[in-house]
């Protein structure tokens, strides 16, 4: 068994977390079921959650934290929202899985189609990875081309074709790709630099009439928070149109988080296809892909491109998603997200700079991020110039003061409708104290 570094000195009670994680190391690879949870890039070991409520998480040792991870984005209305919980409780009485059609699929599909500009038909799946691997197959089937263009540092799940210069956990662990991925699986994957339209144009010229699709995070969240320029998105749309290439927005993270109609509504750019996840399941495992009707009619059984899933359209996930999107449709929701998130990130940046740290960052609605570098950060290469060791010390200091941030410098943060001004003020004060210590 690998030797695990001793956790740093802590004022937190962590005895139960340490005991549980020690056992997990003998049962699960690295002690976790998803790599970034292991705290490898921030030091120490993970805290073990016991429960969540509103904007807070509670660990097995009784510590309480203001949570800015939100289950990595889905908890946009707050953890264990009573209306979502009640709806799920009623559905559980009717069954947890059907493996057959149910009307709830129609209800959620109509909401998604109504709100997302690019989607005329949708297929529900069980994860963001499944949505992204399925949409890649669809782009190839529709265009009869094989090549894919993605951006360095953008993460689209762990399917073989996407594990080329990916961000998120791959960047956190310092892995350029992944063992076990055959060279043939990535031979048709091309990469370009985010926010660099010329790099995209050159790639199209070098691969004329060969690129099936371009996929990107319309706001990067897996290299840290990196927003696009309007010119970049507009240029991508035009290049794809001119070259007969499908444009796909991977909105697994941004979908319904930064606007009611997702990032594509926020920026006024309509892709051909969209992948979704997280928020549309209200915290339950879910994913989806959708787009123009003529493209989606390629998907089996309407068309020849095969994709299936036993738990797709699961009634619990549909129920949680319907209720979550219903809550988000109420007046003032996105205004609240923008207000609390703006106050949060500006407070953190001001506190850091006042303490003498070089920092940059920003937010869009309920999504935010910052880097320990002067910036600006416009792409993954810029993000790698940030001081990740300092972020690790900052992360630990914030944890000590009851603030739970993503345990990686390469992950965006999230707020919810449950976060209050008091939560934000507590966080900024914790940041101010931590900046003075590091």
Image (cartoon, helix red, strand yellow):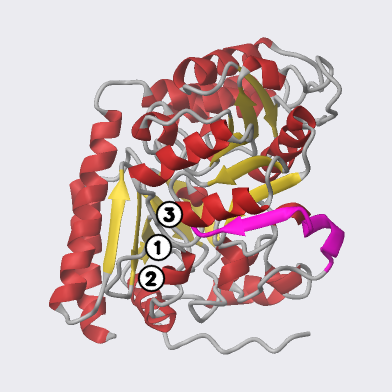
Let me know if residue 178 is in the magenta part. Answer: no
Q: Nearer the viewer, mark 2 or mark 3?
A: 3
Magenta residues span 180-194
x then y, percent, for residue 149: 64, 49
384 vs 249: above or below: below
Q: Which residue is mark 1?
A: 404
Calculate the distance from the C-alpha at mark 2 to the C-alpha at mark 3.
33 Å
- As helix, strand or loop, the secondary structure at mark 3 comes to loop
Calculate the distance from the C-alpha at mark 1 to the C-alpha at mark 2.
6 Å
Q: How many marks?
A: 3
Q: Which mark is residue 195?
A: 3
Q: Which residue is mark 2?
A: 399
x then y, percent, for residue 404: 40, 62
Q: Residues within 10 Å of mark 2 (few under 14, many from 20)?
A: many
Q: Which mark is residue 431?
A: none
Residue sitting at x 23%, y 33%: 335
Q: Quadrant of residue 66?
A: bottom left
Residue sitting at x 50%, y 51%: 72
Q: Quadrant of residue 308?
A: top right
- As helix, strand or loop, the secondary structure at mark 1 comes to strand
- As helix, strand or loop, the secondary structure at mark 2 comes to helix
Of the 4 image quadrants, the one containing the N terminus is bottom right
365 vs 6: above or below: above
Calculate the distance from the C-alpha at mark 1 to the C-alpha at mark 3.
30 Å
Determine whether label 1 and label 2 are within 8 Å by CB.
yes
Of the 4 image quadrants, the one containing the C terminus is bottom left
Q: Residues within 10 Å of mark 1 (few under 14, many from 20)?
A: many
272 vs 400: above or below: above
Residue sitting at x 48%, y 77%: 42
Q: Confirm whether residue 50 shows in the render.
A: yes
x then y, percent, for residue 390: 37, 82
């Amino acid at each position: 068994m690998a030797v695990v570094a001793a956790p740093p000195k802590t004022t937190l009670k962590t005895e139960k977390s340490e005991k549980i994680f020690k056992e997990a190391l003998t049962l699960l690879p690295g002690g976790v079921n998803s790599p970034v949870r292991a705290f490898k890039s921030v030091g120490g070991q993970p805290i073990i959650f016991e429960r969540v409520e509103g904007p807070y998480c509670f660990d097995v040792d009784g510590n309480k934290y203001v949570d800015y991870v939100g289950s990595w984005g889905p908890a946009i209305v707050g953890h264990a929202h009573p209306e979502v919980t009640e709806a799920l409780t009623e559905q559980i009485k009717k069954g947890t899985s059907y493996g057959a059609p149910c009307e709830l699929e129609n209800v959620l599909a109509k909401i998604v189609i109504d709100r997302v500009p690019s989607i005329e038909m949708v297929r529900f799946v069980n994860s963001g990875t499944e949505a992204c691997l399925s949409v890649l197959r669809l782009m190839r089937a529709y265009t009869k081309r094989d090549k894919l263009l993605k951006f360095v540092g953008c993460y689209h799940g762990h399917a073989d074709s996407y594990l080329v210069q990916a961000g998120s956990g791959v960047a956190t662990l310092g892995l350029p790709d992944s063992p076990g991925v055959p060279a043939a699986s990535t031979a048709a994957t091309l990469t370009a630099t985010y926010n660099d339209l010329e790099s995209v144009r050159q790639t199209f010229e070098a691969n004329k009439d060969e690129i099936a699709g371009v996929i990107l995070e319309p706001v990067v969240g897996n290299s840290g928070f990196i927003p696009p320029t309007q010119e970049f998105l507009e240029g991508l749309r035009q290049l794809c149109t001119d070259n007969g290439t499908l444009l796909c927005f991977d909105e697994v993270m941004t979908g319904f988080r930064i606007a009611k109609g997702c990032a594509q509504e926020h920026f006024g750019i309509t892709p051909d296809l969209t992948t979704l996840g997280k928020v549309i399941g209200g915290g339950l495992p879910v994913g989806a892909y959708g787009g123009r009707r003529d493209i989606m009619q390629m998907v089996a059984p309407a068309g020849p491109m095969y994709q299936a899933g036993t738990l797709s359209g699961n009634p619990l996930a549909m129920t949680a998603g319907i209720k979550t999107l219903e809550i988000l449709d109420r007046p003032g929701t996105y205004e609240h997200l923008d207000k609390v998130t703006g106050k949060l990130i500006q407070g953190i940046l001001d506190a850091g700079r006042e303490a003498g740290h070089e920092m940059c960052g920003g937010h869009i609605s309920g999504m935010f991020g910052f880097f320990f570098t002067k910036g600006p950060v416009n792409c993954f290469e810029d993000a790698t110039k940030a001081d990740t060791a300092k972020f690790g010390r900052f992360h630990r200091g914030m944890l000590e003061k009851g603030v739970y941030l993503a345990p990686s410098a390469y992950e965006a943060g999230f707020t919810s409708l449950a976060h209050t001004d008091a939560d934000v003020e507590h966080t900024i004060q914790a940041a101010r104290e931590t900046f003075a210590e590091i």
